[in-house]
Amino acid sequence: MPIKTYLTETLGLRVPVVMGGMQWPTPEELKHAIEQARSLIDPEIAKERSKYGAFGVNITLLPAVVPPDYEGYARAALEAGVRIFETAGNNPGPVIKILKDAGAFVIHKWECAGHPGEDDIGGLVLLALAADQVKAPFIASGGVANGRGLAATLALGAVGANMGTRFMATKESEIDDKIKQVIVQSGERDTAHILRSLRNTTRVFKNKITKEVLELEARHAEFKEIQPLVSGQRGRTVYTKGDPNAGVWTAGQTLGLIHDIPTCKELVARIEREAEERIRSTYAYVNGPSARL
């Protein structure tokens, strides 16, 4: 039986899984594959909406040398007919007001791998706090890459899980195959936080560029010294050239949970199956024949 939550029932999904908005590794082929697997995607442009079932647009608000017109992006997407949005990063208040006033469905990401915040509060605590203090339905983001993780987030009160790094290592992902292999071969200790000195902490893959950035931060370098190393265009070459040391690239601690490169359909089906098995086995703790102490 499919897992039913507020997320699946409201957006018409089979599996309560959202593919996180990823700047470079999210081509149309990958997004379409996620939709076919009946999870939630975020298409690159709203004019493609006729190809998809349930979909959304991601707006990530981060510090930038030339800040984008985030409110303009929101209005443009609304005018194109988009009604599901995912926001992440800095305070999204002004953008969310525009979206809510238009009657849109809004998901705000918090504590996902690329943008962990500044307080280092673990996901278990954050999810428990959210369940206690947040009235709106919420989705767990960060640290989830399999069915066990999905089941755990549901047990903690979430209505679904957001995954980014896990979907990078799929057949439809258009990043270079060498980077996919790096992901499979890496572990949970192969990431690092950078830009904390600028209060823009980002979790990235641990490589030689990361080391240079951390050394500059340790001696209180100004951003103009760090900027060439963390350039988005430089980071993009990691995915196109297959060199994990070409720039900084975001990755979560779920690296330790990724051991293969399946299709999106295979991955989502496995996550669903594993989550159902874990939910049933947990239920047996209080209802099975051996539940009594």
Image (spheres, rainbow, N blue to C red):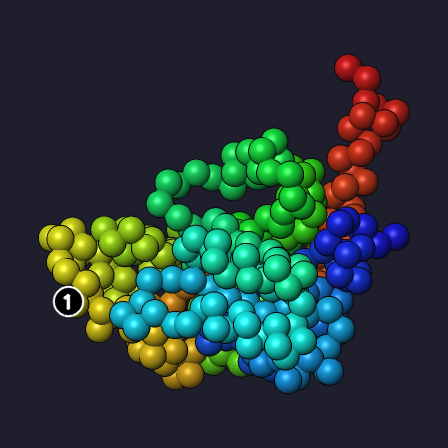
Query: Which amino acid is tagged 1?
Result: Glu
* Callout 1 secondary element: helix
Residue in the picture at 22% in, 61% down: 213
Residue in the picture at 59% in, 48% down: 140
Disc 1 crowd rating (10 Å Cα; few below 14, some 14-19, many 20+) is few
The residue at the far front in this view is: 101
Residue in the picture at 33% in, 62% down: 63
Question: Which quadrant of the figure has residue 230?
Answer: bottom left
Position of residue 249 measured from the top left corner of the image (x, y, whole percent): 38, 67
> Height in image: 174 above or below 161?
below
Name the residue tied to disc 1.
225
- What count of labels does the image hold? 1
Question: Which quadrant of the figure has residue 90?
Answer: bottom left
Residue in the picture at 22% in, 69% down: 227
Position of residue 57 measured from the top left corner of the image (x, y, whole percent): 59, 70
Give the left or right position of residue 252, taking residue 226 as reference. right
The residue at the far top in this view is: 293
